[in-house]
Amino acid sequence: MNINFYMPTKVIIGKECVKNNAVLMKEFGKKALIITGAGSAKKNGSLDDVIDVLNSNNIEFVIYDKVMSNPTVKCAYDGAEFAKNHRVDFIIAIGGGSPMDAAKAINLLACQELTEEELFEGKFHQDIMPMVFIPTTAGTGSEVTPYSILTYDKIESKKSISSPLLFPKLALLDAKYMINLPMTTTINTTIDALSHAVEGMLSIRATTLTNALAIESIEKITECFEALSEKKLDFEQREKLLYASMVAGMVISHTGTVAVHSMGYGLTYFKDIDHGRANGLLLVNFLKLVNKHNKGMIDRLLKAMNFETLEDFDKLLNTLLGEKETISKEEFEKYAAIAIQTNNIKNCKVATTYEDLLDIYLRSFE
Amino acid sequence: MNINFYMPTKVIIGKECVKNNAVLMKEFGKKALIITGAGSAKKNGSLDDVIDVLNSNNIEFVIYDKVMSNPTVKCAYDGAEFAKNHRVDFIIAIGGGSPMDAAKAINLLACQELTEEELFEGKFHQDIMPMVFIPTTAGTGSEVTPYSILTYDKIESKKSISSPLLFPKLALLDAKYMINLPMTTTINTTIDALSHAVEGMLSIRATTLTNALAIESIEKITECFEALSEKKLDFEQREKLLYASMVAGMVISHTGTVAVHSMGYGLTYFKDIDHGRANGLLLVNFLKLVNKHNKGMIDRLLKAMNFETLEDFDKLLNTLLGEKETISKEEFEKYAAIAIQTNNIKNCKVATTYEDLLDIYLRSFE
C-alpha cells in the first residue's frame, strides 16, 4: 500500500456560505483581486455576494473579468500584470473551471518571474497569494485541485500546471449560483465531473481512498441522472452535483486524469467542443477498451451507476449529449497523434496505443 | 446540505516512508523535539529510524520520553517546559494515541501561555510549531485529528482540546513498526478505530462525505476480522488497519465521537480499562439502542461489516475482548452521571438519557 493524501483546501458547502464565512476572508489580507469571466458571475449573483462581503468587511478589491473559456497562457500573463499593478493581497476566483484555472496561473505569475516553459515545469519557490474559490458550475473541481489547465498554442492542446501551491485556501460552494445555469452547461460540466471520478479510478495512482471518494462522487451524480435526462434540476440536485464535482476534484488531485481527458483536449482545441462534452463523447468507447483488460473495474463503475452494461451508460450519454459533431478521419489521426504523447496516457492502468486512441475517436463519432 | 471539510495534514502511507520523506522534515526547522512513551518506540524501530533521518539531515534533536498511557494535563505542562528549555523548532511524535495527544498539548503550551481552563477552552492565538506524527498503533487516528485528549482529574475523566492548530503537518504511516505489536494492544486499538468510524456515522455532524469515509474504514477493518479473531496478522493486514484507523481519524475530525467514547472514559479513568477495550465493551449495547430509533443506519453498518445482526457483531467482540471486568451498579451510576454531562452525548443523532447510559453499562457487563 502506497498512499499519499494531501487536501489542504478548507471546503464549505451550504446556502449562503459566502456571506456566512466572510470572516475567513479577512485573514487573507486587505485587498482582493476578484477573477471571473465576462458574464455569468454577474448574472448568477455570486459577484454581488462577494462584493457585499468585501465591502462590509472593509476589504478593498479590484476585478479582473477578462478570463475567456479555455483560458490561454497569454490570459494568465495579462491577469498577473493586472494583479501586480494593483498590489493585491489575495485572490477570489468566481465561476467555472476557466476563471478558477486562470486564477491559479495568474497568482503564480504575479508572485514569481516565470517564462512559459518554467510555468509548465512546475518548479516554483513558495511565494503565492491565498486563494478563495467560488465555483458556479459543477464540473471542474478546480476548487480542490493543485492544477491549472491552460490552452497552450505551442502544443496545440491544453496543458496542466501542477503544484501544491495551487490549492486554494478556501472553497465556498453554494448551489444557489447554479439555479439558472443553462442545461447544456449543466450537462457538460456534470459529465466532466463524472469523467474525473471514472478516470481517477483508472489511474495508476488510484488508491483505495481515492476509489472510495470516486464511488461516492459517482453515486451522487447517478442520483441526478434522471433529472439531467429530463433537463429539470431542483436546488438539492444542483447541490448534489456541486458536491460530487468537488469530491471528484479531490480524486483527480491525487490520481490525475487518463486518456479521456487527453483525447478530449484535441476536440476542444481544434473544434471548440466544450470540455465536458468532449469527455462525454469519448468516455464509453474508452471504457469498452478498459473492459477488455479490467472487467472488475468496469463492473464496479457500472454498479455505482446502477447500470447493467456499458450500453446502458452509452444510451444515457447519447440522450444527454444529443447529435454528434462531424469530424474527418484525418483530423482524428492528428488528435490521436497529439494525445498519445501526453502524460495522461502513461497515467492509465490500461496501456493504450495510437491505434487504440484513433479507434476510440472513430467509434465515438460513428 | 451543510458540509465542512478540512484535512490539512499531509498523509503518507508506505514501507520506509519515514526514511523516504526525510526531506519534508527539513522544512520544519533545525531542532526537533521527539515526543514518545517510555518503551515501544525504542523496541519497534521507529525511534531509531527517526534518529537516523535527523542525523543524516543535520537536524538537531532532543527526546522527551516521559509520556504515560492516558497522559495527564500535568504531563503536557512538563513536556512544554522541556520544549521551551530546549528551544526546539518542531515536534515529532512517535507512538500510539498517548504520545500523539500529549505532543499536541505540549506544543500548544510551549508556544502559548495558557492556564488549565484556557487550554480546554480552545481559544488560542496562532502560534504553534509544525508537527510530524508517526503512529505505531492503529487506533486513535490522532495523526489526522485536531484533538488532544488528556486525563483531567478535575472532572474525573478525559477531556478533549480541539483546535485546527492541532492538525499535524505531516503523518508518516509505516506498518513495519506494528509487526510485533502485542495482540491485546492490536485488538484494543482496532476496536477504537472501528468505534470512531461507527460513532462518526451516528454524529449529528455526520455528512455524506464523512459517511463514505467511515464505510471505507469499516470495510477495511472488516477485512481483518478473521485475522484478529485468530490473533495472527500479516504485514498487509497491519497496514490495512493502520490505514483504516487514519481514515476513521479523518471521520471524527469532522464529526467528533458520541456516547460510546463518553462512557468509555469512565471505565478508563476509574478502572484503568484500556481506551479501545472500553469502547468495545459498550459498543454493541449502544448500537442496540440506536437500532430502536434508526434501523437504517444500523443496517448500513452491518452491511459494511458483513454481519446479519448486531448479535453477530457482539459475538465477534466477545471473542476479541474475552472475559469482562466486574463492576458494581453503584460504580456504573457514577460513570453514567459523569458521561451524561459530556458534549458527546449531545453530538449523537439518537438522544440518550442517564437511564439509557446506565442500562448500556449494565447490559454490557452482564
Image (cartoon, coloured by chain):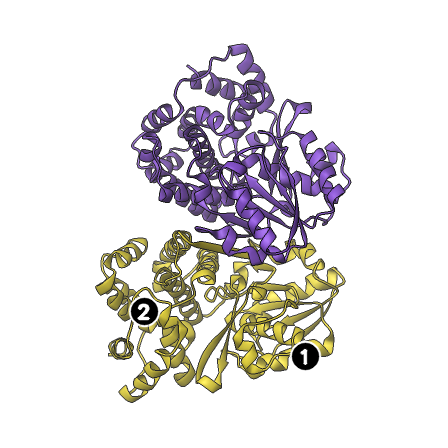
Chain colours: A yellow, B purple
Q: If you read the primary sequence from the N terminus, does the residue marked by circle 1 or circle 2 appear first?
A: 1
- Which one is in front, A365 or A179? A365
**What residue is drawn where x is 61% and y is 73%?**
A108
> In which quadrant is the C terminus of chain B drawn?
top left
Give the x, y percent position of residue B315: 33, 25
Q: Secondary structure at mark 1?
A: helix
* Residue at image location 22% in from the left, 60% down from the top: A309
What percent of the width, then of the height, locates residue B106? 68, 39
> Is residue A153 at least partly visible in the picture?
yes
Residue B339, how many percent across, how many down?
57, 24
**Amino acid type shown at disc 2:** Leu
Residue at the disc numbered 2: A283
Q: Which mark is residue A82?
A: 1
Marks 1 and 2: CB-CB under 8 Å?
no
Left or right for B249, reference B303: right
Q: Residue at x 33, y 35 (%)?
A: B227
Q: Depth check: B356 or A360 in front?
A: A360
What chain does badge 2 belong to? Answer: A
Chain where mark 1 sits:
A
Left or right: residue A321 versus residue A62 is: left
Q: State the image quarter where residue B319 is shown.
A: top left
- Residue at screen point 40% across, 24% down: B321
